[in-house]
Image (cartoon, rainbow, N blue to C red):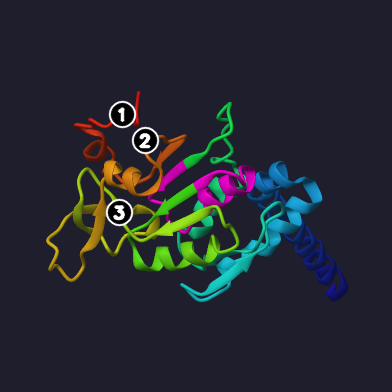
């Protein structure tokens, strides 16, 4: 009968709806896990839900995220690698290492949009941090993200093995994966590069509490032939 067919359709739809609900719940549980571990079950779940704006906004749109424990909101770019880096540093705690002492001076080379710098600055407010970034778009967000932290100084330079100039060799890559190569001063894409020796002489003498390097393959070039006494 017609009513019998309607009953079958309703049962089928309820089963499909149940499958969809279970699937969505599993997705929510898995995706929100780092947030819940970091910030607690309820607050972490709410926090995860708030950053889902990233998937709804136009690529490159700026949006802010309020992070518990930080002095100010964090600016991210929708549809880019920013959210992945945010999850790694803020939620998974990649910058939450225990140094075993109170640092006085930190260099954050390849600071990207400043997430590591602000997490470390919030934990160590008396530590001076130099955040170096050579990409224009990354540096602009870095500058805004660290604005509330008096102990963080953004510097638009690349850390390199020698003073000079470099340029980004893969400008179409994700912002976190830019690689740099040596360049001539008159190259329109050139960015000033500074050696560790020069940076230390300008900023703090010979002592570094922590040197954080995320310079996409240039680490070896930087450290080869080091002769200064900043490293033991």
Residue 229 shows which numbered tag? 1
- Determine if residue 21 is in view: no
Q: Earlier in the sequence, mark 3 or mark 2?
A: 3
In the image, is residue 54 part of the stretch drawn in magenta?
no
Point out the tag, 3 or 1, that comes first from the N-terminus. Answer: 3
Query: Which residues lie in the magenta part?
Result: 106-128
N-term mark: 1 or 2:
2
Task: Estimate the x, y position of residue 20 in percent, counting from the top left.
Answer: 70, 58
User: What secondary structure is found at the residue carrying circle 2?
Assistant: loop
Residue 79, given in percent of the width and then of the height, sits at 48, 66
In the picture of the structure, the residue carrying the numbered disc 3 is: 158
Graded by Cα atoms within 10 Å as few (under 14), some (14 to 19) or many (20 or more), the crowding at tag 3 reads many
> How many neighbours does mark 2 have within 10 angstroms: few (below 14), some (14-19), or many (20 or more)?
some
**Spatial CA span between label 1 and label 2:** 7 Å
Viewer-side residue, 169 vs 79: 169
Q: Is residue 46 left or right of residue 142?
A: right
Q: Spot the residue most to the top.
A: 232
| Label 1 secondary element | loop
Which residue lies under the disc numbered 2? 206
Expressed as whole percent of the image width and height from the top left, the position of residue 154 reads: 44, 58
| Quadrant in which the C terminus appears | top left
| Residues at marks 3 and 1, CA–CA distance in whole angstroms | 21 Å
């Amino acid at each position: 009968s017609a009513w019998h067919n309607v009953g079958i359709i309703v049962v089928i739809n309820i089963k499909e709806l149940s499958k969809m609900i279970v699937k969505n719940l599993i997705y929510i549980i898995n995706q929100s896990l780092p947030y819940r571990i970091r910030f607690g079950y309820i607050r972490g779940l709410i926090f995860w839900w708030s950053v889902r704006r990233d998937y709804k906004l136009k690529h490159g749109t700026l949006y802010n995220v309020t992070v518990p424990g930080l002095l100010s909101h964090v600016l991210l770019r929708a549809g880019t690698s920013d959210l992945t880096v945010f999850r790694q540093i803020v939620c998974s705690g990649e910058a939450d290492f225990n140094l075993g002492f109170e640092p006085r001076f930190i260099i954050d080379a390849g600071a990207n949009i400043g997430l590591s710098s602000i997490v470390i600055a919030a934990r160590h407010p008396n530590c001076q941090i130099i955040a170096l970034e050579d990409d224009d778009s990354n540096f602009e967000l870095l500058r805004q993200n660290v604005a509330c932290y008096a102990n963080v100084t953004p510097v638009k330079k690349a850390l390199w093995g020698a003073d000079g100039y470099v340029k980004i060799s893969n400008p179409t890559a994700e912002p976190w994966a830019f690689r740099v190569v040596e360049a001539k001063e008159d190259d329109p894409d050139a960015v000033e590069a500074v050696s560790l020796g020069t940076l230390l002489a300008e900023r703090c003498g010979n002592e570094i509490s922590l040197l954080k390097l995320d310079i996409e393959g240039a680490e070896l070039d930087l450290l080869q032939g080091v002769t200064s006494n900043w490293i033991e």
